[in-house]
Image (cartoon, rainbow, N blue to C red):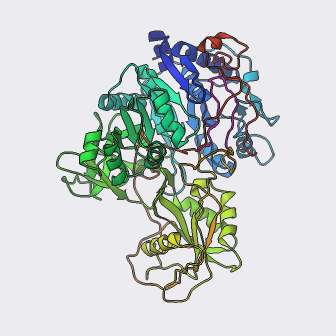
């Protein structure tokens, strides 16, 4: 089959395909198709061809939409990654994915180059930028002369794209999603929600999550429109719903709460608010009921190409804890440790099967074998189904942390802390947080008393994305352990939860000795955004991008994913007494030898469209929910007629890319 955009443009060329939320600029399917054709020609001129794996390390912009469809036209397999990653986090992902080239923008170029640089200062793979390059070794896609190419003829069994997860061991797994997976997901979600010809879907989530990229595929299949926000701001996003008469949006609970706080309720035009990425508090569901917000709690994961279950608003109001019933063609069973199916009401592991579920992870037969069995994908999520078939997700079999809809693997954080020369042991857990659901917290044994939590935070900041940095750090003489030597994680969590609530001068001590400790409670808004740039045309406009580090626009409001600010709260550390508790094996502790093994699919995605609560790597949709008001773009015009002028920077046919103004990426 031809790429879906080509078929859609042939079917409804004059239908609206895309709207830039920041400017109101619109593109028809015919105009978007022309931009895609030219971008595909430029990519082909670089030597990229069918089957090549294109790493996409790019801030959210309208150009991203062009790229997704250009890749499908040429037969490339895009591998989007978060634009918030550090170069140290990006490098192993590029290697793991066997990418042929890396596509970046001004906001991500420096980190892309550093991640791709070899020991002899060469580049392991070519780095290509949509914007004017800052490095001589980087190719500017706009400067590449287009070449003719043969559009790829797709088969349903072929890999369409791959998305990373961060598995329970901290090693990211790469989910291979085939044409049939994505097509099945789009169709089944359409069956549940309905599709109207005039639907407009407000996209606020990063395209490196299924919640951000699946709406792009769904829209061309259905012939509907996407309204793209390059950054998330609660009030502005709520206003966009009204301004553009949006009928759908994908959000995580924190995003929805902030939008309601900012505007009271949401637009009357809305038919669907897909809510996922983290459990929705009952108070939020009740608030939606009281203000007539059509909320659809969902459960999904990257391995299922998006949603697995979806509840209707009435089902959610009647049963505030449910994530609904399975979508058509999707089987959800609850099984015990032996794989036997459990009856309604009994708690076990959720196992998922169906045509939207991937067949495995890229080049990882061990992980694939561990996660997939005769009944389908073992999600690693614990829950149950009631007598009427409604699904309830209770918790996770592993100890991953879901903070603001973002998945954090404690083992990855622990590895970074353990690399500090003054850390002799540590344990990393998630503790309750009213705003983010959970926050990352660490109990640390230090060898140098002069080391502060601020020192450790600075060390971590250079090696981890902002949302992964511990917001609470507490020092102790020794970690609480069982007789067998395992860290007692419930006690660690209890101590750190108390520490997270402490304020300056509060002493949180228990019997036994106490160590001079510091609790950091970082609450500023750095790094909590999806570093989305303000590009507002498929051909690449000016960007105000976040490098994934600590730079945001001055007027950026509070972010909607966990922040990584530097505010610190001084408190007395926990003592080292060993009250007995249930002993958990723990793979997330420096110096521990026992592993906390887990089955399960890694990366339950969420956020709306791919809403999830569970499975290793619960992702969210709001991927990187960003703060910041709409970006304005140089050369933008609200007159669609002007798009045919080749000299206009808003022309989506101008190679599908364009010159970008200098981006503030802090590089």
Residue span colored magenta: 530-546
Q: Is residue 658 above or below residue 565?
A: above
Q: Residue at x 55, y 45 (%)?
A: 624
Q: Position of residue 175 (x, y in %)?
A: 48, 41
The quarter of the image holding the N terminus is: top left
User: Which quarter of the figure has residue 477?
Assistant: bottom right
Asked whether 507 or 299 is in front, the reply is 507
The quarter of the image holding the C terminus is: top right
Q: Is residue 476 magenta?
A: no
Q: Position of residue 566 (x, y in %)?
A: 65, 62
Q: Position of residue 332 (x, y in %)?
A: 28, 44
Asked whether 579 or 272 is in front, the reply is 272
Is the magenta region chiefly helix, strand or loop? loop
Q: Is residue 290 above or below residue 588?
A: above
Residue that extends furthest to the right in the rendered view of this protein: 136
Q: Is residue 542 magenta?
A: yes
Is residue 204 something one can see in this rendering? no
User: Which quarter of the figure has residue 494?
Assistant: bottom left
Asked whether 308 or 228 is in front, the reply is 228
Q: Residue at x 57, y 14 (%)?
A: 31
Q: Is residue 514 above or below residue 621?
A: below
């Amino acid at each position: 089959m031809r790429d879906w955009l080509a078929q859609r443009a042939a079917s409804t060329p004059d239908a609206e395909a895309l709207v830039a939320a920041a400017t109101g600029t619109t593109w028809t399917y015919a105009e978007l198709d022309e931009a895609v054709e030219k971008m595909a020609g430029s990519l082909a001129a670089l030597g990229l061809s069918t089957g090549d794996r294109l790493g996409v390390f790019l801030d959210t912009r309208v150009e991203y939409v062009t790229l997704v469809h250009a890749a499908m036209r040429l037969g490339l397999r895009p591998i989007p990654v978060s634009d918030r990653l550090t170069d140290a986090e990006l490098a192993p992902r590029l290697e793991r994915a066997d990418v042929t080239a890396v596509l970046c923008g001004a906001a991500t170029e420096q980190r892309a180059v550093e991640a791709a640089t070899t020991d002899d200062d060469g580049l392991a793979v070519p780095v290509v930028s949509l914007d004017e390059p800052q490095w001589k070794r980087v190719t500017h896609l706009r400067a590449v002369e287009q070449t003719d190419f043969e559009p790829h003829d797709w088969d349903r069994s072929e890999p369409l794209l791959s998305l990373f997860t961060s598995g329970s061991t901290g090693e990211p797994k790469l989910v291979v999603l085939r044409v049939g997976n994505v097509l099945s997901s789009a169709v089944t979600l359409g069956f549940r929600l309905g599709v109207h010809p005039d639907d407009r879907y407000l996209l606020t989530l990063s395209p490196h999550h299924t919640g951000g990229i699946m709406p792009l595929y769904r829209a061309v299949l259905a012939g509907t429109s996407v309204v793209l926000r390059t950054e998330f701001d609660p009030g502005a996003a709520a206003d966009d719903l009204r301004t553009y008469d949006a009928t759908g949006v994908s959000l995580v609970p924190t995003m929805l709460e902030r939008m309601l706080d900012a505007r009271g309720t949401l637009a009357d035009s809305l038919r669907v608010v897909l809510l996922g990425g983290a459990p929705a508090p009952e108070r939020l569901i009740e608030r939606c009921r009281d203000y007539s917000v059509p909320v659809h709690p969902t459960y999904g994961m990257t391995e299922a190409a998006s949603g697995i279950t979806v509840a209707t608003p009435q089902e959610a109001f009647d049963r505030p804890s449910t994530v609904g019933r399975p979508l058509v063609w999707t089987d959800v069973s609850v099984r015990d440790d032996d794989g036997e199916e459990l009856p309604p009401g009994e708690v076990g592991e959720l196992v998922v099967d169906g045509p939207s579920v991937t067949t495995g992870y890229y080049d990882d037969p061990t992980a694939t074998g561990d996660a997939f069995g005769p009944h389908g994908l073992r999600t690693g999520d614990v829950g149950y189904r009631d007598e009427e078939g409604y699904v309830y997700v209770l918790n996770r079999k592993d100890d991953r942390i879901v903070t603001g809809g973002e998945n954090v693997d404690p083992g990855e954080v622990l590895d970074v802390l353990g690399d500090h020369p003054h850390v002799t042991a540590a344990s990393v857990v998630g503790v309750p947080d009213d705003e983010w659901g959970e926050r990352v917290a660490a109990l640390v044994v230090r060898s140098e008393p002069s080391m502060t939590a601020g020192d450790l935070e600075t060390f971590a900041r250079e090696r981890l994305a902002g949302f992964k940095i511990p917001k609470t750090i507490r020092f102790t003489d020794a970690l609480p352990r069982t007789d067998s030597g395992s860290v007692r994680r419930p006690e660690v969590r209890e101590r750190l939860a108390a520490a997270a609530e402490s304020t300056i001068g509060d002493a949180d001590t228990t019997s036994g000795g106490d160590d001079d400790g510091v609790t950091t409670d970082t609450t500023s808004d750095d790094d909590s955004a999806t570093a989305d740039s303000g590009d507002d045309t498929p051909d690449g406009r000016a960007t105000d991008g976040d490098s994934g580090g600590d730079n945001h626009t001055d007027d950026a409001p509070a972010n909607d994913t966990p922040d990584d600010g530097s505010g610190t709260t001084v408190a007395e550390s926990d003592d080292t007494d060993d009250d007995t508790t249930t002993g958990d094996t723990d793979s997330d502790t420096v110096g521990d030898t026992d592993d906390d093994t887990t089955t399960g699919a890694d990366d339950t995605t969420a956020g709306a469209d791919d809403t999830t609560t569970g499975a290793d790597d619960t992702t969210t949709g709001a991927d990187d929910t960003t703060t910041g008001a709409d970006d304005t773009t140089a050369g933008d015009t609200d007159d669609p007629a002007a798009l045919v002028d080749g000299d206009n920077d808003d022309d989506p046919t101008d190679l599908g890319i364009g010159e970008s103004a200098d981006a503030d990426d802090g590089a």
